[in-house]
Amino acid sequence: MEYEPVIGLEVHAHLLTNAKIFCRCSTKFGAAPNSHTCPICLGMPGVLPVLNKKVVEYAVKMGLATNCRINDRSVFARKNYFYPDLPKGYQISQYAEPLAEHGRIEIETGDGKKIIGITRIHMEEDAGKLLHDERNPSSYVDLNRTGIPLIEIVSEPDMRSAEEAAAYLKRLHEILVYLEICDGNMEEGSFRCDANVSLRPKGRAAFGIRAELKNMNSFRNVQRAVEYEIERQRHVLDGGGKVIQETRLWDDGQGVTLSMRGKEEAHDYRYFPDPDLVPVEIGKDWIAEIEKTQPELPQEKRERFIREYQISSYDAGVLTASRALADYFEEAARQAGKPKIAANWIMGDILKFLNEDKRSVKDCPILPADLAALIRLIDDGTISGKMAKEIIDVMYKTGKKPGAVIEEKGMVQITDESALAKTITGIIEANPAQVEQYRSGKEKVFGFFVGQVMKATQGKANPKLINDLLKKMLSGS
Amino acid sequence: MKITKEEVEYVAHLARLEFHAGETEKFTSQLNGILLYMEMLNQIDTTGVEPMTHAIAQKNAFRDDVVGESLMNEAALANAPDGRGDFFRVPKVIE
Amino acid sequence: MELNELTIHELQKKLRAGDTSSTEIVQAVFKRIEAVEPRINAYITLMKDVALADALKADEAVKKGDIRALTGIPIALKDIFCTKGFRTTCGSRILENFIPPYDATIVEKLRQAGAIFTGKTNMDEFAMGSSTETSFFGTTKNPWDLNRIPGGSSGGSAAAVAADECIASLGSDTGGSIRQPAALCGVVGMKPTYGRVSRFGLIAFASSLDQIGPFTKDVEDCAILMNGIAGYDPKESTSIPQDVPDYRSFLSRGIDGWTVGIPKEYFIEGIDAEVSEAVQKAIKCVEGLGAKTMEISLPHTKYCLAVYYIIAPAEASSNLARYDGVKYGYRSPDGQDLLDMYKKSRSEGFGAEVKRRIMLGTYALSSGYYDAYYKKASQVRALIKRDFDDAFKTCDIILTPTTPTPAFNVGEKTGDPLQMYLSDILTISTNLAGIPGISVPCGFTKGGLPVGVQFLAGHLEEGKLLQIAAAYEKNANLEKRRPNL
């Protein structure tokens, strides 16, 4: 039978606040265990949570960027379960009344554009970390991560392939990073994804039984895990078996998903409104204020770049990969007045340098103004393209302005016609045989003369000028 | 019976409590008495009544995004029944 | 009279006049504690050394002219308030050795006002009880009759004031836990409006109902302590961001022309005849002060207990999940694995009443029962609050008995939880509605047990409560008695 995969994703993103969601501990990654804790995030008796306002603002930003309806009123609820990484015995989350709902984003698929629905976005606190001791039957609890603000973004089950799931995930990631509300680091766990995967016979409306996939810490692993799971379920169904509703962990080493069956119990989270927190009411004014701070989103930017700078869709994609890179490009393009050429230099040289050094464009030693200056120097004939390649290399290594590099190296192109004519006269006089050949119609020897001129000027002469002068003088006129 | 012995056992597990055999029966009978008393609430029509989850209706209580002092690690662990190094230690989570 | 028998305002006068010192007051209090504590058991932890050291500092401050509202006054704290560096047990084995690294906001405020702490008082475990019998640290006895309970859950705080083992004390009230023991011990006890006094550092029982308030020997002291503890706290999301009036300014205003509502549902069968008689006398007294009384109706009164015993345990089941033997508190040595450690630690660490309420609350929130119990109760709660809103459109104050009976015998109700719960029947509605209430002594039974009258007012009307309580206290002409210990 032919099956259709149905995939929905739940994404958890750490918000880039300074302090935790309900207390004043730092959110910085990598501190000594249990050193970013206080009575509140340790869940000590009698302490109370107070909501970090920035968390609401950031969550609203994501809601707006994904075309969600921002609810006038949202409420925190307690999700009750016992686990050593959850100090209060409940997680403060949102349940019946989340912050934002009914959103959508557009992704690119092999068959063109597709809309993926966003069911909801809500705010919650992260749990701590458990480290397991391999040698003795103990686990160790580090509560630094407890209380780091998260938003959970739940998609509709709108994806039909692993590629679509990956495209959706990349799009969400890109938006979060563009909004500067999440660092997007999957290895450190600041951007995490669970996937719900089921199959149904093609053409049927009802969903099949789904498995929930966890433990995928890269885009590639999400795609691989979903692909594997689709194949696994197809195999089960084809063999006449039944898929069971369960949580499965992705095993990166083996490249398979493994059942957690028997090791988890039926959940009964006993959600109820948290009496220690009051409702969040977001009026029109507040939303308008947040809207003012919204940056241009990657998709809009790409479309504008194509339109405004006449660059290819591919180039626009590369140049909008990050907000910083797009800003870099726009600044260089504006100052140089040559967007297409600026794009070529950035994509051909600057990104190559940065990638080799694993450096961010924000730390690029060549400022957009310097790149623009270089482009202008080529444009006005001061230097040749070949020289520019050499210069940009030095600029990147030293951070010097193009003018300074040119001066140091004495790399100014010879554009003085009379000086060049003098050199050419000398060469013509020294090579009468070749002159004769040229004049008798053997135009191939023209290259010989160009080479001679370049050699005599150490490559500093403007090639166009050489051509023009040589032609004129060789023809004897 | 509002609640059976099996339900009491299930609820006890959810709440991470355990009872001896005799205790479970006693709790079951006491909880039944209390739950029967609660039955009286069904006499009231609450259609359309907004549930009251706070004693005083308030909204939007926030703190600014400013980092304050955390506890020193020793203070965080001072009350721990089994603090090991920088960590709280627990019996292994069986997965 | 001994110094420990005086009120805050009397001692303040003496301190200002240089007639006594804080050290003398604290010594008198501890002398009394040493004499009667073996019979009363009002305290879980005493803080004598610190109190004496603080008294010296207070005396230094007085010499320099730095006299604040509570300078040098020995005050007892219910062991539900976190005290930095001092054991805070909440009456439970599970917190037997817990030392908080932080102070409750009210502890900070009282210290700021110059108060000296005598110790942490006994209470029902996690404030779940009406008799102080569920404490892991033994029952507190009623100073008026050592065979009887002092009420609860703040029984230790009430008994300590009644027995002059402190000058005043603080308690918490979730369903009557200040007013009921105040009535049964013959002292003044107030539960302020929800959100008026910060709950930060108050170990939670039921977060939407808990409120902190004072136990004092008279109404003026109640106003003084309210001045010390009330006010907005940015550390609590449900704290009310409103200025606090000077509560002492209400004390001598009188109640001429007021309307006092007498809810018919509170004078029902089951109210002890002697209690009823004392409260009727109080009504007459109030009328004599120029107030008009009228019968009113709070139609959903009979549902209060059922609503309370769903909402409070539901919130408690979640609030008490943090006691899991991981970060602090009791851990059973016998846990085989994590799940077993959780179950054994909690089952051994909590007493029977706490476990009963965790079970009840867990059940009320569990899948399939949420709507029938928690949601239904929250809806009826809204109707109960509406009753009060309507009532306060027609009257200034509501007057009721505080408790249906005087103090009962130790052990009398421990076998039947529902009977025990019924002793809160007249105080619970206040917490559900979030309004303030005060219990003031209104006489004695023939057997010499104190009886209390309760006044209730609308949100943030603590001033009005103190106004009527002070007027009543001044004109009631009650016989001055002290427990015979």
Image: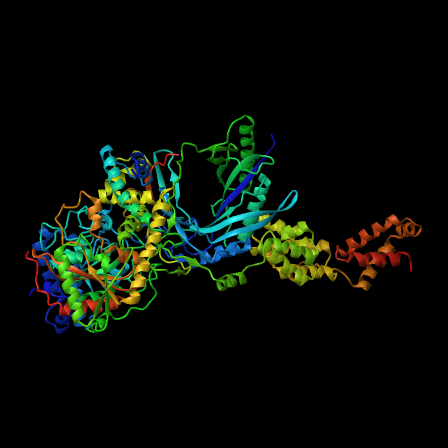
* Residue A390 relative to residue C71: left or right: right
Which residue is more in the foreground, C217 or C307? C307
Looking at the picture, the colour scheme in use is: rainbow
Question: Where does residue A209 sit, x and y in percent of width and height?
Answer: 50, 35
Q: Going by the picture, which residue comes out furthest to the top?
A: A239
Quarter of the image where the N terminus of chain A is located? top right
Q: Residue C241's quadrant in the figure?
A: bottom left
Q: Is residue C165 visible?
A: no
* Residue B9 relative to residue A302: left or right: left
* Residue C86 relative to residue B10: left or right: left
Question: Where does residue A461 sit, x and y in percent of width and height?
Answer: 77, 58
Question: Where does residue A436 sit, x and y in percent of width and height?
Answer: 92, 51
Quarter of the image where the C terminus of chain A is located? bottom right
Question: Where does residue A110 sit, x and y in percent of width and height?
Answer: 65, 42
Which residue is more in the foreground, A111 or B72? A111
**In the figure, C110 relative to C134: above or below?**
below
Which residue is more in the foreground, C320 or C340? C320
Taking the spot 22% from the left edge, 57% from the top edge, the residue there is C266
Q: Is residue C21 visible?
A: yes
**Circle count:** 0
**In the figure, C273 relative to C56: above or below?**
above
**In the figure, C469 relative to C370: above or below?**
below
Taking the spot 29% from the left edge, 47% from the top edge, the residue there is B40
